Image (spheres, rainbow, N blue to C red):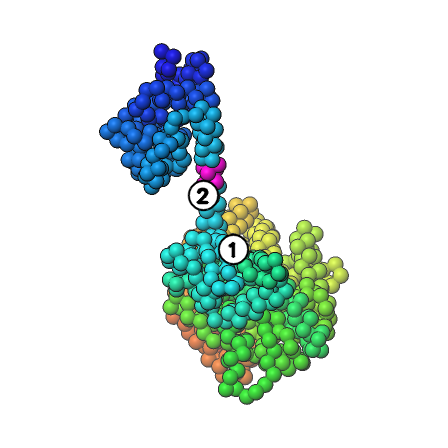
């Protein structure tokens, strides 16, 4: 048949009849699909021929009951219905189409007799899109169908664009609004309602409703801005904080344009609202990460630069000074090493809070009225803090703030049920007296802080040029010390230890000296503190131990009398876990009898709860090496540590021996140490004995072994051996 065509929705291919030709395997979407429902076969054939001639894909049914099943299967681009069909008329079929999700927007053309005026009204009520009067006119039918389909496509594109715009607005939290300046009423998009927390009710809102949502502190600013915009006729924008109806505070950005009538009068405003709360929170978080320390919440070094620039501008206007304080916690590393980094972090946070409190203005309420410099605080690095004081009139102003800081930070800290005492060293530089560049002033305050530490810590010092010279000398000496071992500039000397009151050798203690190429022979006090500070001490200890073991080997091979040789070992070797390897290497290389070797450690090694220290000391003792606790009584350890660690000898520090005859406390402490050592069956050696009277006092207390200049100063190797020969001869 000429009107026969095949349609297969399952395979998305179709057979169409267009202009008497049969086309197959064409995708459905290439041609609009039209469903015709007409009970009269002749009219149905006519309409089909018209549409197929125009290039449409046509599906036809002859009964109203077949419309809905066919529609749901086909989902056509257009439906043409006969108003009067058996079983189900066109108006009811149209209502049922509109009742399906797919039929809401599909255009429906109703074919109605030209004289049937009532059907036109019924068709419109049922949801018909357009009408075609019978009898059918070919040209009119063709143009009407093309127009309706083109309009439908345009509407679909518009709806798609609106949907995309709505999605974009929802994602951007952006809503549009219009305001009639005559009535003050506002028409808003749904997203504006969502932003403001209003419930869409189809009613316009007043401008006062929006103003009531703005937080009180910003209402006057927004009202004045809009008043000025209306006066000048310019566009305007603003940001403000609002409280939505659900009680949530939001930040919104508004931008608007003022429209005018033909007389130039402002009559309409169009604009948009955007909820920028999340963006502002993200910006604040980025700013916090970029400009603030995550641990303490203080500003970081980047922010300090802004503080300084603002302070300089203020100082130039007011003819005042700026002080930069470099605050460093004394021995903070000991907290991390003994209590752990978690405890260290808690200390840093507490320090930051105390620094804030020490410079808060309200802390001065109820105090006498006085000039107070304004302060900004920065965590510079690790346990170092910078404070910038502006509006400073003189050095006295700075001194008052520094004293408050010292008082605040020196109070005990309770960290994880452990009471901790922390002292601080503070260096101070002044703008513009010491310099005008921020980096220079920070460097100068750092130099002053370093000198405060060298003076015993827990103090502060103002920068001066002489400190800078001293620091440069210190740095130069550090560089030279690093090269001293390679250049063979280090020397070992020996101080004999005697059994008093005679001159019977009990052993010798080794001491290191530095034959500096320009400064001459330097004693240990001139460079060992620097070596400890920089970590060079471990290299020096290794060199001294190897040198001494080689000398012991020489004495062993010569079968010289038994000399027990003591070597000082820094606590750094325990912290670096290098002590056992260093000792084993020296013993294996020289093959000496370990019983000739004694290692002297300070009380600092015994602090904390590091299990490595106990293991290392026990391993050394098992090797046959003796252990001495040097400078006993000056550290922080308790007397109970003598029983906890495998110590053989206690050496009484020179600070007690020096004043043993004039200071009853020193005498009492010395006597107690000797008595305790005797009860624990430990050897006791007194250091720094300078006079016969000191020796006799020690003998009365029960200490028989001593060393010091009264017996012999430290000697070079040749002098030691000569001294040994002379004492052996005299003893005979």
Is 113 left or right of 474, judged from the image as shown? left
| Outermost bottom residue | 368
| Residue 275 in view (yes/no) | yes
Q: Nearer the viewer, residue 590 or 244?
A: 244
Distance from disc 2 to disc 1, alpha carbons, whole Å, reads 18 Å
Provide residue 375's location: percent of width, then percent of height.
59, 73
Q: Is residue 578 above or below residue 647?
A: above
| Outermost top residue | 1
Q: Is residue 156 magenta?
A: yes
The numbered dot on residue 373 is none
Q: How many marks?
A: 2
Q: Residue at x 66, y 55 (%)?
A: 482
Label 2 Cα crowd, 10 Å radius (few <14 / some 14-19 / many 20+)? few
Q: Residue at x 51, y 84 (%)?
A: 365
Residue position for label 2: 163
Q: Is residue 717 above or below residue 138?
A: below
Q: Residue at x 71, y 75 (%)?
A: 317
Is 313 left or right of 180, judged from the image as shown? right
Provide residue 213's location: percent of width, then percent of height.
44, 65
Identify the mark nearer the N-term, 2 or 1. Answer: 2
Residue position for label 1: 272
Q: Give, as a single range, the part of the protein colored magenta.
A: 154-159
Q: Nearer the viewer, residue 564 or 169?
A: 169
Is 3 left or right of 382, judged from the image as shown? left
The quadrant in which the C terminus is found is bottom right
Query: Magenta stretch: dominant SS?
Result: helix
Q: Residue at x 35, y 22 (%)?
A: 44
């Amino acid at each position: 048949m000429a009107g026969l065509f095949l349609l297969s929705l399952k395979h998305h291919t179709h057979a169409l009849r267009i202009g008497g030709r049969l086309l197959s395997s064409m995708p459905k979407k290439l041609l609009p699909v039209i469903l015709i429902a007409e009970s009269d076969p002749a009219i149905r054939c006519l309409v089909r021929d018209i549409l197929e001639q125009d290039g449409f894909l046509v599906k036809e049914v002859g009964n109203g009951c077949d419309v809905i099943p066919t529609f749901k299967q086909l989902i056509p681009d257009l439906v043409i219905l006969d108003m009067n069909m058996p079983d189900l008329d066109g108006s009811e079929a149209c209502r049922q189409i509109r009742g399906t999700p797919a039929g809401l927007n599909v255009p429906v053309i109703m074919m109605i007799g030209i004289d049937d005026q009532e059907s036109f009204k019924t068709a419109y009520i049922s949801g018909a899109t357009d009408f075609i009067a019978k009898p059918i006119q070919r040209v009119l039918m063709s143009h009407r169908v093309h127009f309706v389909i083109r309009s439908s496509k345009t509407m679909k594109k518009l709806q798609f664009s609106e949907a995309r715009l709505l999605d974009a607005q929802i994602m951007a939290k952006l809503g549009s609004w219009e305001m009639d300046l005559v009535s003050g009423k506002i028409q808003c998009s749904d997203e504006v309602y969502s932003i403001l927390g209003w419930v869409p009710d189809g009613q316009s809102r007043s401008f006062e409703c929006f103003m009531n949502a703005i937080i009180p502190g910003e209402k006057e600013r927004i009202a004045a801005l809009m008043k000025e915009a209306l006066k000048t006729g310019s566009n305007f924008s603003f940001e403000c904080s609002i409280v939505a109806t659900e009680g949530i505070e939001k930040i919104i950005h508004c931008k608007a344009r003022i429209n005018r009538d033909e007389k130039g009068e402002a009559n309409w405003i169009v604009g948009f609202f955007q909820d920028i709360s999340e963006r502002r929170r993200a910006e604040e978080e980025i700013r916090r990460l970029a400009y603030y320390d995550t641990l303490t919440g203080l500003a970081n070094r980047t922010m300090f630069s802004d503080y300084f620039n603002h302070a300089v501008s203020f100082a130039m206007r007011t003819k005042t000074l700026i002080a930069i304080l470099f605050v460093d916690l004394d021995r903070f590393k000991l907290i991390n090493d003994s209590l752990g980094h978690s405890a260290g972090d808690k200390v840093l946070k507490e320090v930051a809070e105390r620094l804030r409190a020490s410079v808060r203005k309200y802390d001065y309420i109820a105090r006498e009225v006085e000039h107070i410099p304004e302060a900004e605080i920065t965590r510079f690095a690790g346990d170092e803090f910078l404070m910038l004081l502006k509006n400073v009139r003189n050095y006295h102003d700075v001194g008052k703030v520094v004293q408050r800081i010292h008082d605040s930070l020196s109070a005990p800290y309770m960290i994880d049920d452990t009471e901790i005492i922390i002292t601080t060293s503070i260096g101070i530089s002044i703008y513009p007296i010491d310099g005008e560049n921020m980096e220079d002033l920070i460097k100068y305050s750092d130099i002053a802080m370093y000198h405060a530490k060298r003076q015993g810590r827990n103090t502060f010092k103002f920068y001066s040029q002489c400190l800078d010279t001293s620091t440069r000398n210190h740095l130069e000496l550090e560089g030279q010390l690093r090269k001293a071992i390679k250049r063979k500039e280090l020397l070992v000397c020996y101080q004999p230890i005697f059994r008093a009151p005679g001159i019977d050798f009990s052993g010798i203690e080794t001491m290191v000296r530095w034959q500096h190429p320009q400064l001459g022979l330097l004693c240990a006090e001139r460079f060992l503190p620097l070596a400890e500070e920089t970590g060079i001490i471990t290299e020096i200890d290794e060199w001294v131990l190897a040198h001494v073991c080689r000398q012991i080997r020489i004495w062993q091979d010569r079968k010289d009398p038994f000399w027990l040789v003591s070597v000082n070992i820094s606590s750094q070797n325990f912290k670096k876990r290098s002590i056992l390897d260093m000792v084993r290497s020296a013993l294996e290389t020289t093959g000496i009898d370990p019983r000739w070797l004694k290692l002297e450690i300070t009380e600092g090694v015994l602090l904390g709860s590091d299990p490595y220290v106990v293991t290392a000391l026990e391993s050394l003792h098992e090797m046959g090496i003796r252990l001495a606790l040097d400078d006993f009584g000056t550290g922080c350890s308790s007397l109970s540590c003598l029983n906890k660690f495998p110590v053989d000898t206690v050496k009484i520090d020179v600070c007690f021996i020096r004043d043993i005859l004039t200071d009853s406390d020193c005498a009492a402490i010395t006597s107690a140490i000797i008595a305790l050592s005797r009860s624990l069956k430990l050897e006791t050696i007194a250091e720094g004995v300078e006079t016969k009277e000191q020796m006799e006092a020690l003998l009365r207390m029960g200490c028989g072994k001593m060393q010091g200049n009264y017996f012999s100063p430290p000697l070079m190797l040749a002098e030691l051996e000569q001294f040994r020969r002379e004492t052996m001869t005299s003893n005979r």
